[in-house]
Amino acid sequence: MLSPGWRELIIYPIAGAIYVALSVFFPEAILSVFEGIAFLLVMVWLIPRIVRVLR
Amino acid sequence: MSWVAHDVEPYVIQRHLGKRIAFIPLLIGSYAPDMSTKWFVYGVNLFGFELKADNPAQFHRGWPGVGFTHSLAFGVVIGLLIFLVTRHKVWSYSFLIGQWSHALTDTGDTVGTMLFFPFTTHHFSVGAWAYAGQTGRFNDAGAYFSGPGFVWDGVWIVLATWGWKTLTRSYFEENVRPTDPLWIWASAALPAVFVLALYRGAYFYGVCRWISWLLWAHVANDYAFSIVWGGPQWVPVLSVTSSGTFIRGPMAGCMGPCCGGMPRF
């Protein structure tokens, strides 16, 4: 089991890579900081939470 | 205008001022000059009607227009209002510092900002990269990420990343949260991971945005790099004469005593 620090070191770059990939093809996704922060929250908080609940 | 500097500058400032500054008003101040005006600069389509300023640059940076949001006085007035309403001195000057950093950063393009409005409508401009907001959002992005502008943003990303400790959980808990009741409230109401992501959000967005637009401009599209002073050279650049008239063409050059020729600063 990874420590929270290591988990963050992995999850943030993954979230960033996905966001960049999405944004290159759909640049509308990078027009607002609110969308950027919402995406980050989904990736680092909501999805891990859903995964934990489903386990 | 700067596309990414306004997202990451607050982290550099936070690193230097530590507990003496409140991050949320600092970030809001950094966004404030463009917050409610950019959509009208680029235009939006609502139910078949296009809402867009007749003269986007004049609207964004000039007077008449909302160019006063890029003046130093605007930061002072809103900072004072924050103080009068909240009696929170740190919130007040944190907003001021954020707004001033935005106004000063935007002097880097060819249009510049009316720093000393309302005392003068003179546009202070270094003219390092082309102002191309009038060409629409995507062409503006293509131009900005092909000229010196994206290099300037890259410098801020390096500076913010160099101070990576400001992004750590321990730094947030020791230096950011205690100085601001908003973070204390958020930390009590929301999970720690959520609050930390909120704090890191603008940095995440800024870095992703910088990489994305670069890839969009040069991999997905064929915008040509032109990293020259006032560039890119291929975009119809705007600048402002000493009398405040917006013109097409490179550096109008202010011959007034304040600047003594080019560049206008």
Image (cartoon, coloured by chain):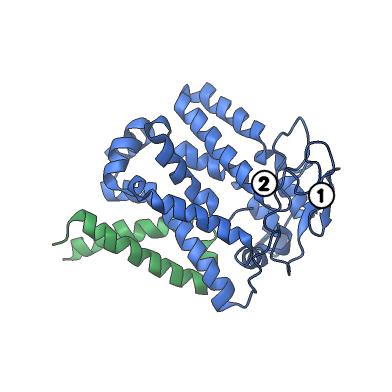
Where residue B230 appears, x then y in whole percent? 71, 59
For chain A, give the colour: green
- Front disc: 2 or 1: 1
Which residue shows up at 78% across the image and 39% down it?
B122
C-alpha separation, residue under disc 2 versus residue under disc 1: 14 Å
Where residue A18 appears, x then y in whole percent? 39, 69
Is disc 1 on the same chain as disc 2? yes
Query: Mark 2 falls on what kind of element?
Result: helix
For chain B, give the colour: blue
Q: Is residue A32 visible?
A: no
For residue B83, above or below residue B158: above
Residues at marks 2 and 1 touching, judged by CB atoms closer than 8 Å: no
Where residue B111 appears, x then y in whole percent? 74, 50
For residue B143, above or below residue B112: below
Give the residue number, with chain letter if any, for mark 1.
B253
Query: Mark 1 falls on what kind of element?
Result: loop
For residue B63, above or below residue B130: above
Give the numbered dot on residue B107: 2
- Label 2: chain? B
| Mark 1 Cα-neighbour bin, 10 Å: few <14, some 14–19, many ≥20 | many
Q: Quadrant of the C terminus of chain B?
A: top right
Give the numbered dot on residue B197: none
Which residue shows up at 64% across the image and 65% down it?
B227
Front-most of residues B158 and A33: B158
| Mark 2 Cα-neighbour bin, 10 Å: few <14, some 14–19, many ≥20 | many
